[in-house]
Image (cartoon, rainbow, N blue to C red):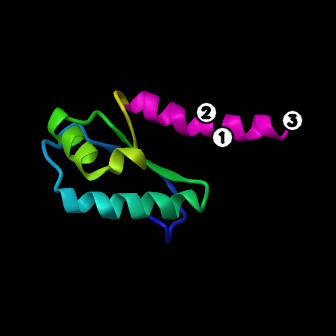
Amino acid sequence: LKRNEHYKVLLDMTNVDHIHYRVMKHLVASAEGFRDQDGDIKMAQLSDETKQVIQFTGADQYLEDYATISEAILSFLNKVDERDSLFQ
């Protein structure tokens, strides 16, 4: 993704029943790298079990999750709007 300059990533977790806790470390590190490029990683439609893993690992402090894909997309757009309003 970085090679193609895609820094805003939305993970649709609709069909994910479980995520291994070790993956969270890599997602957080990737999100931090994307943020350096004005991007981020956001997740949408997490199962209860996946939310528990994210909370257990502390990744919920670094990764945003949303109930719907639309909300996650809007959060990317709102972040741009907030930055623009700082310079007006």
Query: Helix or strand or loop: what does disc 1 sit on?
Result: helix
Q: Amino acid at mark 3?
A: Gln
User: Dividing the image into 4 quarters, which one contains the C terminus?
Assistant: top right
| Residue 80 badge | 1
In the rendered image of this protein, does residue 30 appear above or below residue 76? below
| Residue 28 badge | none
Q: Which residue is mark 2?
A: 78
Reading the chain from its start, which is encountered first: label 2 or label 3?
A: 2
Q: Is residue 85 located in the magenta-colored stretch of the structure?
A: yes
Report, in whole angstroms, how far the alpha carbon at label 1 lies from the one at label 3: 13 Å
Residue 45 position within the rendered picture, expressed as x and y whole percent measured from the top left: 28, 33
Residue in the picture at 50% in, 51% down: 40
Does residue 2 appear left or right of residue 61 in this picture? right
Region of the chain picked out in magenta, as a range: 69-88
Q: Amino acid at mark 2?
A: Asn
Query: Helix or strand or loop: what does disc 2 sit on?
Result: helix
Instruction: Please tell me in which quadrant of the rendered image residue 44 appears.
Output: top left
Residue 58 position within the rendered picture, expressed as x and y whole percent measured from the top left: 32, 50
Main secondary structure type of the part rendered in magenta: helix
In the rendered image of this protein, does residue 74 appear above or below residue 23? above
Q: Which residue is mark 3?
A: 88
Q: Are marks 2 and 1 in contact (CB under 8 Å)?
A: yes
